[in-house]
Image (spheres, rainbow, N blue to C red):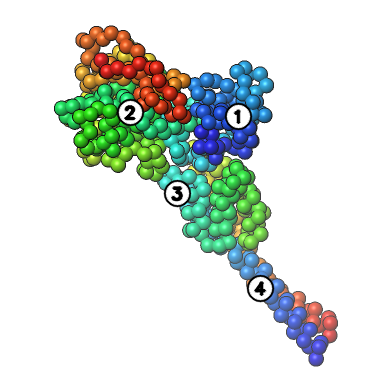
Amino acid sequence: MIKLLGAVLILFAGTMIGFQQAARLAARPRQLRQLAHALQRLETEIGYGHTPLPEALERTAEAVPEPLAELFRDTADRVQGPEGLTFRESWEQAMTSGWGLTALRQTEQSVMLRLGSTLGISDKEDQLKHIHLALLQLKAEEDTAREDQSRYEKMWKSLGVLIAVLVVILMV
Amino acid sequence: MLDRVIHLLPPELKAVLEKLPESAMEHLEEIRIREGRPLELGIRGQSRFAASDGTLRAGSDGAYKPTADICRKLLEKITNHSLYAMEEELKRGFITVAGGHRIGLAGRTILDGGNVRGIRDIGGFNIRIAREVVGSARNLLPKLLDKNRKTVHSTLILAPPQQGKTTIVRDIARSISYGHWGLFENAAGWSGRKVGIVDERSEIAACVRGIPTFDVGPRTDIMDACPKAEGMMMLLRSMSPEVVIADEIGRPEDGEAIREASHAGISVIATAHAYDLQDARGRPVLKQLLEDGTFTYVVELKRTGEGFMHRVVAADLKDKLPPAAREPTAATSKGEQGRTYAGMQRGDAP
């Protein structure tokens, strides 16, 4: 009886792990797309609205879903905080502390950190160029993420179940 | 005075300035920050260097030197981390922040077809702390009144930089707008006048998002950050002002607009950089305006340790006036900070 219960638990856990990995794979291209949308929003705020960065970030945060919105809101909060942080410091802190909540990887993070070191410190044209560059890089990442998704999503789903079955068979 | 701008400064600089003696903080007028060079303070018209322990000295030896990092932080703070949103300001060379404080910038300019497009590598900042001295024009205004039209005569106010032009013109705007016409007894029953201010440098009214942060009176409209000539014409067309006020005129189109306004029956009160009337005649635009009789009066301002001193001169060039001493612009019995102007001679406008 207990053996049976254990087997069922292992099967369940294996399936879930597989599904979770698959969900992460599916979430990555979606969040990359949302991040690109956010940057486009920021581009508009800077290019046409001449909105100051803290306000532009807050508006960007309103336009994208969580957990990405938190990255921008956190930056805006930090930069306006009493510690007198520079924009770059605030951006770096926000991107590092909030990154774990997203399905995004190291490559995207370095794209964003690079962008953060240029935001706010040059004229409009230069700002737009840097955002554009970041957008191109994110687009390339999105394409590979989509390939990964189509290639590995199904695999992870079945792999989880199959490994769980293997473990159960070995145990019995 | 320091507490008004302390929020703009990076923590390192804040720590130094907070150690200043009480009286220096109170009379602080300018903070001049130059990258890698001694920190200079303007206190009651005098230049002093500050050491890192807050002591003041006349010589620059041993003074505190702000680093490149501090200057970068300061620039970020005053531009609200958004240099791109400040392109117009950088073209003009200064930024006005909430509260009317003007921060002058110096550095390497970027040229575009021979015109300055902006400044980069900014290495020098001059934070000028704006002051609002209510009643600073109380003695001056009655001398400028036009008794027939129950308003004020067109007046040109002349002074070198840092002598209180903006402070005086702001108080004039406020007094006219409220209808506080001052000592002149017949003016007691006059109502206030509609005032239009063209505030190209955002210094007179210190608008933040179109709302003035200084009290400029209840009948006052402000064109903020607007080129003076265009702003004057816009006000004329749209807001029907009776008195138009503009700061620091000097370009040919300014003269054109002022002439236009004065022919429309509007009194114009303008300021310009010049030591005195003689000096002003050396500037083509001012000379032309004075010769045309656009201004009835010229006021020469000078700031002394006691307050603002003024001298009213009829602008008509044909009248050769005997030179007179400058007089205080505010009440003679008791000035700001309780200092007295007693003993200073007071007389009628020539």
Neighbourhood count class around disc 2 (C-alpha, 10 Å): few under 14, some 14–19, many 20 upward: many
Question: Which element carries disc 3, helix, strand or loop?
Answer: helix
Question: Which amino acid, mark 2?
Answer: Arg
Q: Chain of mark 4?
A: A
Neighbourhood count class around disc 1 (C-alpha, 10 Å): few under 14, some 14–19, many 20 upward: few
Above or below residue B160? Residue B260 is: below
Above or below residue A130? Residue B51 is: above
**Residue at which label 4 appears:** A19
Marks 1, 4 in one chain: no
- What residue is shown at x 27% (from left), y 26% (from top)? B142
Q: Return the residue nearer the eye: B68 or B271.
A: B271
* Marks 1 and 2, how far apart at CA: 32 Å
Question: Which amino acid, mark 3?
Answer: Thr
Rendered location of residue A4, percent (x, y): 78, 88
Residue B21 disc label: 1
Question: Which element carries disc 2, helix, strand or loop?
Answer: loop
* Marks 4 and 3, how far apart at CA: 38 Å
Q: Chain of mark 1?
A: B
Q: Chain of mark 3?
A: A
Marks 3, 2 in one chain: no
- What residue is shown at x 56% (from left), y 28% (from top)? B24
* Marks 1 and 3, how far apart at CA: 47 Å
- What residue is shown at x 39% (from left), y 17% (from top)? B343
Question: Which element carries disc 1, helix, strand or loop?
Answer: loop
**Residue at which label 2 appears:** B138
| Contact? badges 4 and 2 (CB < 8 Å) | no
Left or right of B157, for residue A30:
right
